[in-house]
Structure formats: C-alpha cells, structure tokens
Image (tube, rainbow, N blue to C red):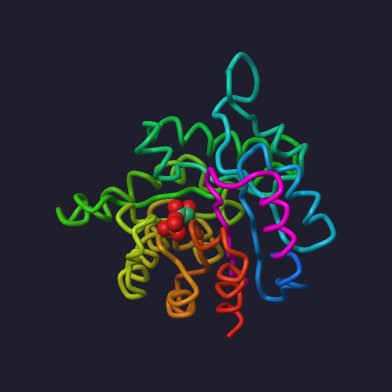
Amino acid sequence: MARPTVVAGNWKMHGSRDTARALARAVVQGVGDATGLEVLLCPPFVHLLDVLEETAESPVQVGAQNVCDQPEGAFTGEVSVAMLAELGCSHAIIGHSERRHVYGESDELIERKFALLHQSTQQGDPDAPRAILCVGETLEEREAGRTLDVIHRQLQPARSFPDAFPRALIAYEPVWAIGTGVAATPDMAQEVHAAIRTHLEQEFGTAAQDTVVLYGGSVKAANASELFSMPDIDGGLVGGASLKADEFLSICQAVRK
Ligand code: 13P
C-alpha cells in the first residue's frame, strides 16, 4: 500500500474566528481536489467548528491540537475524544513538544491519550480521530547522542497498541527545529524517519511500511520539496508557515512536483 503524503497545518494558539475562517477558505480554494495529497488543518479548539464549516465541501480535513486522556468526567478545561469525533475531527495531535516541555505532559499521559484514541475506534466509533503522535529530541539530547533513545522511549505507546497503526500517524519534530527557522536537513530527518520505521517494525511488529511519518520543525515553501522527496518522509506538520495561505499552499504544491 502506497503511503499518502500528508501536509498538516498546526495553527497553535493563533488567530481569531475571522482569520481562521479566511485562512481555511483560502486553503480550500487553493488545494482544489487535492489528488495524491491529504491536507489537514488543526486550528485552536474554539475555531474547530468555523473551520469545519469552511472545509465541509472539500477534501481538506480538520483535526485538534490535543485531546484529554480520559473519556469523560470532571476534567475542567479538557476536551474528549468523543467530543472531537462528534464535531467531525479526523485527527488529534498528541505529545506535541509544547505540551511535553511547556505543560509538562509525561510519556504516561500521552500513552493514555494514544490508547483512548485507539480504543475509541475499536469500540465502535469508526469516526474517532486518528492520533498524530509527536516525537522529537531536544538539542541537548541530540548533542549527547541520545536522539534515538529519546524517540524510542516516546514511541512506547506503539509497543502497547501495535495494531493502532497504520491508522495512527507519527510526527518527528526535533525540538530544536520548532519555531527556530532552522529545519533538520533532509538527510538528518531521513535518518531518524528510517529509524522510526525500523523500530516500529522490528520492536512492535507494526505495519510500519504503511504508517505515515511526518516531519515537523521550520518546514517552509523553500525546503518542503527537498524534505518530502526523502523516502521515509511522508509529508509535514507545519507550524508558523501554515498561518499564511500562500506559504502553506506552496508547501502543498511541493508534494505534487
Ligand atoms: P514550526 O513550523 O513553526 O517550526 O512549528 C512546527 C510545529 O511545531 C508543528 O507542530
């Protein structure tokens, strides 16, 4: 099975209802029928409905930037898998480095989110969002030669739920490349992506060849085609550059070349 190429925009905490709608509308118009490419927009929770409305008649998918690790209950400020599914969210990002490093989310918490997304699909909600599990090392960890150790640890949810793939996606986002303007070189990223695929296959017996592994960290129009042309890079999780329609559409265009 050929893996699709996926370009996902993580809008983080930016924009208003008006700018979210305008950006979504511009992406829908620019992407057209999107053959050979899956486009996903991940706005803040409060803009999900607006963006879902703007994308309703198009192949552009809409996902959440996070989800709660519990199915329901007294969890102030949280949003559940079922709530996202009811809205029509196709994906949920979990384990983003800003959640891990700014909000102190642990591997255990992220594993519970992964489990819940997987189990919701299995327990009769075929429309439950697909997990995008983010992994990535800090600069300190890279310099200490610990990149793969860190990533193997962060892939732990895959060990417990190997059959979650290839429905679940992985995003390799080196922390030092996020928001810095300094992307990993295509060779550097390819090396880690290949290692992720090998680890999934050898350690967990997962459908690794069918699993989408995205690269994230300072992706822009100028480096997207080089990155996406690497054999194990199946597209991008784009932050800053996804906030400008022209730039984001140029990144989408890079896939088609
Ligand atoms: P930037 O593209 O702004 O570096 O952000 C990457 C990211 O964190 C996407 O999830």
Q: Quadrant of the C terminus?
A: bottom right
Magenta segment boundaries in residue numbering: 1-26
| Residue at x 19%, y 50% (from the top left corner) | 140
Q: Is residue 130 highlighted in magenta?
A: no
Q: Quadrant of residue 187?
A: bottom left
What percent of the width, then of the height, locates residue 13?
53, 43
Q: Quadrant of residue 128?
A: top right
**Residue projecting furthest to the top:** 74
Q: Nearer the viewer, residue 27 or 86?
A: 27
Instruction: Decide: is 52 above or below 32.
Output: above
Q: Quadrant of the N terminus?
A: bottom right
Residue 238 in the figure: left or right of residue 156 = right
What percent of the width, then of the height, locates residue 105?
40, 32
Count of marks overlaid on the render: 0
> Is residue 201 among what the camera can see?
no
Instruction: Decide: is 182 above or below 52.
Output: below
**Residue projecting furthest to the bottom:** 257
| Residue at x 64%, y 16% (from the top left corner) | 73
Q: Quadrant of residue 16?
A: top right
Q: Nearer the viewer, residue 190 or 246?
A: 246
Q: Nearer the viewer, residue 199 or 41?
A: 41
> Is residue 8 among what the camera can see?
yes
| Residue at x 85%, y 60% (from the top left corner) | 57
